[in-house]
Image: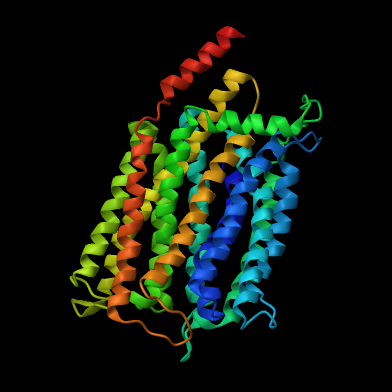
Amino acid sequence: MLGYSAGEIANSLLGNSITGFAMLFYTEALGLSPKLAGIAMAIAVFWDAVTDPLMGHITDNTRSRFGRRHPYILLGGIAVTIIYVFVWYVPGFVQGHQAALFWYLVVVNLLQRTAITVYLIPYIALGFEICGDYNGRVTLQGIRSGLNMLANLLGPALAWTLFFSDNSGLRATAVPQNYLNMGLTFAAVSLVSILFVTFIARKHLVDSTGLPRSENSVLDFFRDMRDILTDIYARHVFGFTVVVMIGITLVASLQMYLYEHFMRFDGLHKTIVHGGSMVCFGLGSLCSGLLTRRLDKKGAVYFAAVLNLCGSLSLAAVLLTGTVVPEQTLAVAGVTLPLATIVFVLLHGTYWVGNGIMFPTTLSMMADIAELNELKTGRNKDGAYAAVFSFAQKVAISVGLLISGLVLTVIGFRTGVGLTHAPATAAKLCGATLVAGPCVSLLALLLMRLYPVTKDLLQQMRAQARTAS
């Protein structure tokens, strides 16, 4: 489980750094309007979502002595690390021109998202096959999610200190070279992660040359998509995933601006706050297996949603009412403590604990559903189910990014080196980040309430399949 999950390090470093810093890079450092940046990134993520189901079908139907998953994990992984560098390396002739910057961002991110699809979908499908136990699936995905957050902590979170420390009159987030230094470092570490997981997971490589081939791969693809999208078990998870991810994306993309322009954290405090969120997400992920054993999977999701909402709304309440103000300190026994930072870490961390529980639990639900389909049809569609789940996530991320850019425009947020914002604008930013996102996530529970799959149902279906055979 640990060896397989190491592949998530690359996904975390590459994906989380783009989610967390790309909007800042193109708006703060290069001067692209937030609206255009949001549209460009939304286009790329939507393309990523559209290509996921196709990649799922391709990997399920690959016939190779190197298996159905491993060639794509290796080749796609190498490609994505190379293309990723060019997200942060913008040629001089592109800079300073809104249209040129917009299209450069679109093209490079389309290429990067295509490569990550080739790597990630087979990688997720391999995880479905490694572990077939109902609770063990949550544990596996929890470990993978925990390593994602550990990499996020040591990478994008620590980047505030390593690459974006304000040590001059110019904000570090306004210096393009800082982003390129981060990109080169993360690309190198990601490449090592990809090579490692390809090697360590070699014992799960199964020669697929003898598997039957589809007579019409195009028609078969559309039949698979129809069957998955109309799967009575899957549609509850898909709907929940889309709605909850829109809310999470709103928070994740806007919180960077909240650090900078409302809380006014310096580089060290940004690292502490952002790192604290990652630690809390990881702790939630590692606890997800224990929660599902006590509450089953749907109960664990409900519990996570309550934590999610309580943490964020409590933080919004203390900040917007002025109970705690940015940069506020507290003297205790002669020691000055950063009260605002501590309160932010604790309450915002509670929000991310809830998300940490939800992510691996919902993905393990999809693995259960894929197994139920295989018991019914006799065909392994792990790649297709993993891909459609990823499709649902990315459609939501695309919508969330688009909304984020529009929200910044609506509240009157302006970009540019040295600009400051009125207190009213900063307060609107705080409210949009801490209230709107979690409330959207709460709506997702309405789509989860009818989800029927439990451990008993899965065992019953397994028994019926054994009897039939």
Instruction: Examine the rendered structure and indicate whether residue 257 appears above or below residue 465.
Output: below
Q: Quadrant of residue 443?
A: top left
Of residues 103 and 267, the one drawn nearer to the viewer in this rendering? 103
Give x and y (percent) for residue 433: 35, 63
Q: Residue at x 56, y 13 (%)?
A: 465
- Look at the image and tell me whether residue 206 can be seen: no
Give the residue at the far bottom of this rendering.
Answer: 169
Residue 109 relative to residue 173: left or right? right
Of residues 398 and 457, the one drawn nearer to the viewer in this rendering? 398
Give x and y (percent) for residue 269: 38, 74
Q: Residue at x 47, y 22 (%)?
A: 458
Give x and y (percent) for residue 369: 52, 29
Instruction: Examine the rendered structure and indicate whether residue 65 appears above or below residue 177.
Output: above
Residue 444 relative to residue 173: left or right? left
Residue 221 relative to residue 392: left or right? right
- Look at the image and tell me whether residue 226 can be seen: yes
Give x and y (percent) for residue 456: 42, 20
Q: Residue at x 54, y 59 (%)?
A: 42
Q: Residue at x 43, y 52 (%)?
A: 246
Instruction: Examine the rendered structure and indicate whether residue 336 appears above or below residue 287.
Output: below
Instruction: Examine the rendered structure and indicate whether residue 366 appears above or below residue 101.
Output: above
Of residues 4 and 253, the one drawn nearer to the viewer in this rendering? 253
Quarter holding the N terminus? top right
Quarter holding the C terminus? top right
Q: Quadrant of residue 201?
A: top right
